[in-house]
Amino acid sequence: MKSALTLSLMLLLAACSPGVTPPPRNLNDACAIKAERPTWYKAMLATQQKWGVPVAVQLATIYQESKFKGDARTPLAYKLGVIPMGRNSSAYGYSQAIDGTWKWYLRETGNRGAKRDNFDDAVDFMGWYMDQTYQKLDIPKTDARRHYLAYHDGHTGYRRGTYRRKGWLMRISKDVQARAVKYSEQLAECTAK
């Protein structure tokens, strides 16, 4: 009887708990993120080791894509301002990977159980995608600005220069680069201590 009650309470708590980890409290401080989410930092270090993408570039890209929300989605599109017509894209999760690119990642890596709302899987995806970008477009893995442009517009779009007609995207890519530099400086400080 006692074990049945304990099991019932555990199931109730599991059902009431959120499905994804909430974002860290201070998104502007890489050291605060590292301290608050040490398992995330460990996953980013593993991605850096495996794919060669610096932690600061990963952090800056995730900040821009989802603000560290594991269940982030693109906004709903509305017809006549009131009739919901679905989402602007299939982008989902920390990395905002779209369905087709995520399936490509699953197929290429064999990581069939990966989920876009799992932080470890999301950063592994980003590392893999940026490694593909490096191989296809020869963009250094430290270049957060150009990686973000290729991440947003895809490899073909980047090669065609579609981002050049998007002033807003050019501005955002510069913000991503500045944030990556800031995060890198912060991590150098707190890692040296």
Image: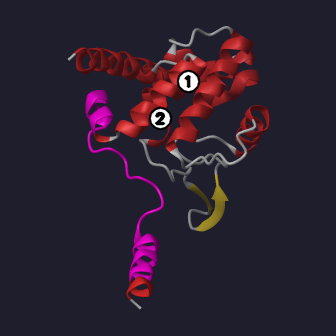
Q: Position of residue 2 (x, y in %)?
A: 37, 87
Image: 129 above or below 62: above
Mark 1 closeness class: few <14, some 14–19, many ≥20 residues within 10 Å? many
In the current view of this chain or complex, which residue is farthest to the left? 193
Mark 2 closeness class: few <14, some 14–19, many ≥20 residues within 10 Å? many
152 or 192, nearer to the observer: 192
Magenta stretch: includes residue 19: yes
**Type of colouring:** secondary structure
Which residue is located at x 56 percent, y 62 percent?
A: 81
Q: Which quadrant holds the N terminus?
A: bottom left
Residue 22: which numbered mark, if any? none
Q: Which quadrant holds the C terminus?
A: top left
Q: Earlier in the sequence, mark 1 or mark 2?
A: 2
Tell me the quarter of the picture where residue 52 sits: top right
Q: Position of residue 160 (x, y in %)?
A: 75, 17
At label 2, the amino acid type is Ile
**Where does the magenta region start and end?**
6-35
158 or 23, nearer to the observer: 23
Q: Position of residue 85 (x, y in %)?
A: 67, 62
- Please name the residue that numbered disc 2 is placed on: 62
Magenta stretch: includes residue 60: no
Circle 1: element type: helix
Circle 2: element type: helix
- Please name the residue that numbered disc 1 is placed on: 148
Spatial separation of the CA atoms under disc 1 and disc 2: 10 Å
Q: Nearer the viewer, mark 1 or mark 2?
A: 2
